[in-house]
Image: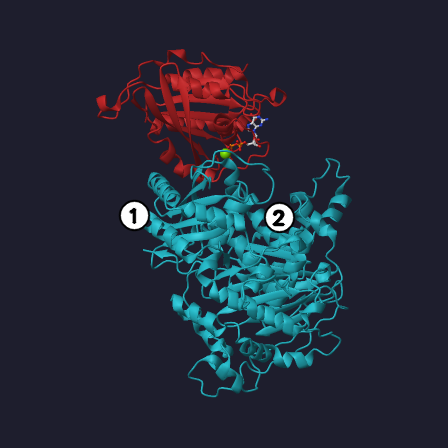
Chain colours: A cyan, B red
Amino acid sequence: MPEDEDQQQHVAAQRESSPQPPPLPRRPTTIEEEDGLRPPLTPSGSVRNFKGSPRPPLQSKATTAVSQVDVLGLSQDASPSNNQRSRSHSRQPSGRLQSRAGSDDDTASVRSVQTLAPGQSGDIESLLDDVVGAAATETDEGVEERDDAASLDTSPLQNIRDDLDESFSSEFEPVGSFEPDGSNGELLNRQWRAKLKHYLILSSAGKPIYSRHGDDQLISGTIGVVQTIISFYQGAQDTLRGFTAGDARFVILSKGHLHLLAISRLGESEAQLRAQLEALYMQILSTLTLPTMEKMFINRPSTDLRRPLQGTESLISSLADGFTRGSPATLLSALECLRIRKAHRQVIHSTLLKCRSPQLLYGLVVADGRLAAVVRPKKHSLHPGDLHLIFNMLFEADSVRAGGGENWIPLCLPGFNNTGYLYMYVSFIDPETGSPREDIEQPLDGRKRDNEIAVLLISANREAFDEMREMRDKVVDQLQANGSLAHIRRAIANGRSSCTSILNTNKADTKGADTPAPIAHFLYKSRANVQFVMPSAGPLFSSTVSWRRLISLYARLQGALHGKTTHLKVVHVVTGGASALAWTTPTFEVYVVAGPRAGKHVLAKAAMGVVQWARREEERLFVVGGAVF
Amino acid sequence: MATTGNKNINAKLVLLGDVGAGKSSLVLRFVKGQFIEFQESTIGAAFFSQTLAVNDATVKFEIWDTAGQERYHSLAPMYYRGAAAAIIVYDITNQASFERAKKWVQELQAQGNPNMVMALAGNKADLPDARKVAAEEAQAYAQENGLFFMETSAKTAANVNDVFYEIAKRLPRVQPAQNPSGMVLMDRPAERVASASCCS
Ligand SMILES: Nc1nc2c(ncn2[C@@H]2O[C@H](COP(=O)(O)OP(=O)(O)OP(=O)(O)O)[C@@H](O)[C@H]2O)c(=O)[nH]1
Ligand SMILES: [Mg+2]
């Protein structure tokens, strides 16, 4: 698949190493499209290595971390102790924005509302100028700058990635099996090669453990080649981490006795693919625990791990397909929460605390696949990677949900402790009545059902089912009585907000017609909470293909922000079908996407609008800290 | 353990058997009257409760649908401990699943509640052409070991309710209060073994 080389691509970037002094933020230097921003592409057939690249593993900071340590230049500049303030610094509000990470009190968000209140938009604009100011001077090379909102055109976006065509919708169709006479081998191979994404897992002894596409017979050749290449490098006391061949990127993650391989033609970066492989590895650990798996391989290096993993293939596949379909949660290593009033969330939290069984380790209320509330011990927070595994098991794979009963599931949460099991009580409740859900709703094979509320109670005691069940009864009774179920139900029904309604909440007068948002979609990640928020996908991104295009664009921006050679704070990308801007600070990351003709300043202003909104609504959008005991 | 009160009996029931034998499908059929062609393998265990009226009592089953995967084996005692009844399920089209069922019977005989009502269910009886385990063989085995036997089909519903109904009838009707030791007396010896056997 040819890369969209001919598209206009301009990246306005700030480098950490940029030598220029303040004003805030440092003057960005634009860089042309380079390695590190885009997947390095080499002529078909050639193989190119990329080794090294230490990348933080998927299991990142806890959801409830209060502050993040990777303070970048931006916040140093913004800190009050910095007396080299520029003109704009002294009157722009970013200092408060930057310093919000550590403060947990409500007043801070109120203050940020004030500083960003209407009437001070001049300040905002000047901040924006600072953020993208220099970039603007560098985008002359063929990009039409149109900052007047009237000329914006957010509808196309079909061409976020021109070459991702409708064939992507057959990505998830199974490759067939061999006829007994082997006559269809050619066809199967063609089907297999047509897949844009492959995941293979094999043991270091070369035994196949998992393949997303194709049966053993079909993949045996590939497994052999992969095994040979890996051991060639190992023989040379070297570790092969990946290479590109043609338009396909190969990434290998070697963990103990396992090799995990991803092959992608979706333009994902090495780091992104590596994070995906880490998640698959965590899923395997979640089933077996690390010591158990290691013991198997030590006792018998030729162990066939498929047996002990039997029945979890569907979990691995639903994780893998989530990545291929496009998962903002994995891209951002963050969790999405149910938007609910702060006071309402507090009621749920105090209910959880009141009903807490002494056997409880973690308790979660999840609605519509999003976290509504969490109760946890003071000294333990939950890892996004672990939560992702749980959410995948409960809401993406059908194993648990389709059963319709209450469940008691032993599982290892590797981010918490990869050596032992915890026991998870799961009950899906009917949001209307609060009783355990009785019917199995159709369609059984469809996507996520919308109106589900799940209560998850995790204990370290395998015998604690009855206690957990009792706690569930109490919690649900009280949530019903105190109106929380109704609030959750309403939040589910409201769904995610649209870009337009979100950006209009920043306007001075709340009356009057909504101005259509200049952007079509955004992602906002609160680093302190390790959580993210996004608007409704809307009709624009409702199809598998358009959603994948959007995610590919986000992935590219994310890759540019967190590339191994570049650490950029602002990235601006224009393709044939879309323009997009990403901005990272120590406290947040924001990504906005609009039609191809939206100018940088329009994007930046919208990004700022999203930031304002997210700041103001922080305790509605995110579970801040959770209920702690 | 089965407990009674005003002829209301609470009975813990556990389903055991090989991967894919059809435990979840039997429960789904019994509890919800449904069947899923591509039922996913159970993770951990699932819990259901279902009430059944028999002539003289109302039996509330607390059903544990366990996972057949080998890696969950060590958790099994947690589910059969204190169970008043067990259904050991195999797939009539799969000889290995029958062997596995015998292993479960042995384990229950060795470790389970001695008064447990045990049923052997030869499932997928709707697939006679693929049959690998003869009904007679299973019947004989059940008789020898004091189980009652039925061939069932979760798909067609044949004999599914019957298994649970038969268990309900066989459960002891004794007040636990009169039984402080926890011993449960059988008011009906297992003389009716296999009387309800066979599929339609
Ligand atoms: N034809 C037919 N298929 C059945 C019947 N019962 C179950 N199946 C199918 O057999 C497969 C396995 O059934 P499950 O109910 O998941 O088996 P299980 O014993 O719960 O398996 P584990 O949870 O892995 O231990 C599913 O695809 C069912 O649709 C039956 O009576 N007839
Ligand atoms: Mg099952």
* Quarter of the rendering occupied by the N terminus of chain A: bottom right
> Dot 1 surroundings within 10 Å: few (below 14), some, or many (20 or more)?
few
Residue A560 in picture, x, y percent from top left: 61, 70
* Residue type at numbered disc 1: Pro
Q: Is residue B171 left or right of residue A440?
A: left
User: In which quarter of the view is residue A626 placed?
Assistant: bottom left
Which residue was labeled with disc 1? A358
* Residue type at numbered disc 2: Ser
Chain hosting mark 2: A
Residue A349 in picture, x, y percent from top left: 37, 53
Do the dots labelled 1 and 2 sit on one chain?
Answer: yes
CA distance for labels 1 and 2: 42 Å
Q: Residue at x 44, y 50 (%)?
A: A289
> In the rendered view, would you say A46 is above or below A276?
below
User: Does the rendering let one see residue A148?
Assistant: yes
Which quadrant does ligand 1 occupy?
Answer: top right
Chain hosting mark 1: A
Q: Earlier in the sequence, mark 1 or mark 2?
A: 2
User: Does the rendering let one see residue A237?
Assistant: no
Which residue was labeled with disc 2? A211
Q: Is residue A258 left or right of residue A175?
A: left
> Dot 2 surroundings within 10 Å: few (below 14), some, or many (20 or more)?
many
Q: Residue at x 34, y 23 (%)?
A: B9
